[in-house]
Amino acid sequence: MSTAKVEVDDEVVGSIFGGLMILLGVKQGDSPKDAEWLAAKAANLRIFSDGEGKMNLSVLDIGGSALVVSQFTLYGDCGKGRRPSFVNAAPPQEADELYQYFCKCLSEQGCPVETGRFQTTMQVSLTNDGPVTLILESP
């Protein structure tokens, strides 16, 4: 990823130039161990190109950073009816705590972290190289 930014009310609240754009959904039953596992996985996942063009480098290897945006709609269930159900998403207080903890864990891995603003309407911009988009879920 080349660049990403998050704006709230026309103010840039987080931006990066090279690294990971992480849309983080927290579901009911997620725990601090899930956040720790995901942070370690994201920091060390070899998805950036090396000198030979192979996906062989992590965000840490390239000196990149992460923009982490809370995204409860990732757990929207569209299986029934015409409107998504968000019953699988964690309640806001619980989700915010795990979101903040995930960001702390990712930072402790050595990855600089920028964030959006929890429970606000955000405008998210992203230039996605490749594009490469992956889904990570804790075990």
Image: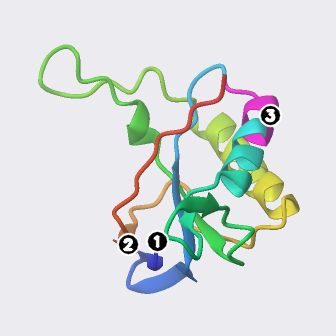
Q: Nearer the viewer, residue 38 or 63?
A: 63
Separation of disc 3 and disc 1 at Cα? 27 Å
Task: Residue 57: say if magenta.
Answer: no
Q: Is residue 87 left or right of residue 65?
A: left
Q: Is residue 131 left or right of residue 102?
A: left
Q: Is residue 127 above or below residue 26?
A: below
Dividing the picture into quadrants, the one containing residue 13 is: bottom right
Q: Which residue is mark 2?
A: 126
Q: Is residue 74 left or right of residue 92?
A: left
Separation of disc 3 and disc 2 at Cα? 28 Å
Residue 20 percent location from the top left of the image:
56, 65
**Residue drawn where x is 66% and y is 66% of the image:** 59
**Residue drawn where x is 46% and y is 86% of the image:** 11
Q: Is residue 119 visible?
A: yes
Classed neighbour count for the residue bearing mark 2: other residues with Cα under 10 Å, few (<14), some (14–19), many (≥20): some
Q: Which residues are magenta?
A: 30-36
Residue 49 percent location from the top left of the image:
54, 68
Residue 1 marker: 1
